[in-house]
Image (cartoon, rainbow, N blue to C red):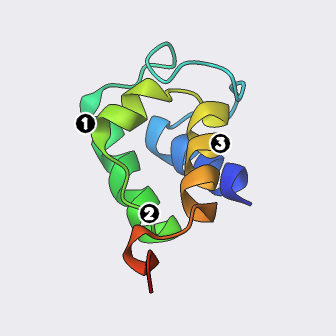
Amino acid sequence: MVKHAIRKIWTDELELQEFSDDEDFFSLGGHSLVMTKIQLRIKREIGLAIPMDDLFRHATINGISDYVAARLSAPSLNTAGA
């Protein structure tokens, strides 16, 4: 589900239909302004705020999907000790 949502966001923002889940964002023509749009959409549509440097570190569909899934499944730090 996460991968599908992120692929849709990338497809829309990069204005591409065909690309591999392992292709690097920048090799697909992405740049910082597009990455900012992707960051905002992930927050709005998936409910997770991702720091820009993490988006740059995980610059493939597979990479960012795994990162987002791990963050979503991690216990909240706010509930620690509750």
Q: Which residue is mark 1?
A: 33
**In the image, is residue 60 above or below residue 26?**
below
| Residue at the outermost front position | 81
Disc assigned to residue 12: none
Residue type at mark 3 is Asp
Residue type at mark 1 is Leu
Label 1 – label 3 distance at C-alpha = 23 Å
Mark 3 / mark 2, whichever is N-terminal: 2
Q: Which residue is mark 3?
A: 66
Residue at x-position 64% and y-position 54%: 69
Q: With 70 as the anchor, is 51 left or right in this view?
A: left
Query: Looking at the image, is mark 1 or mark 2 nearer the viewer?
Result: 2
Query: Looking at the image, is mark 1 or mark 3 nearer the viewer?
Result: 3
Q: Which residue is mark 2?
A: 48
Percent position of residue 26, x then y: 43, 18
Residue at x-position 53% and y-position 42%: 10
Label 1 – label 2 distance at C-alpha = 19 Å
Q: With 41 as the anchor, is 17 left or right in this view?
A: right
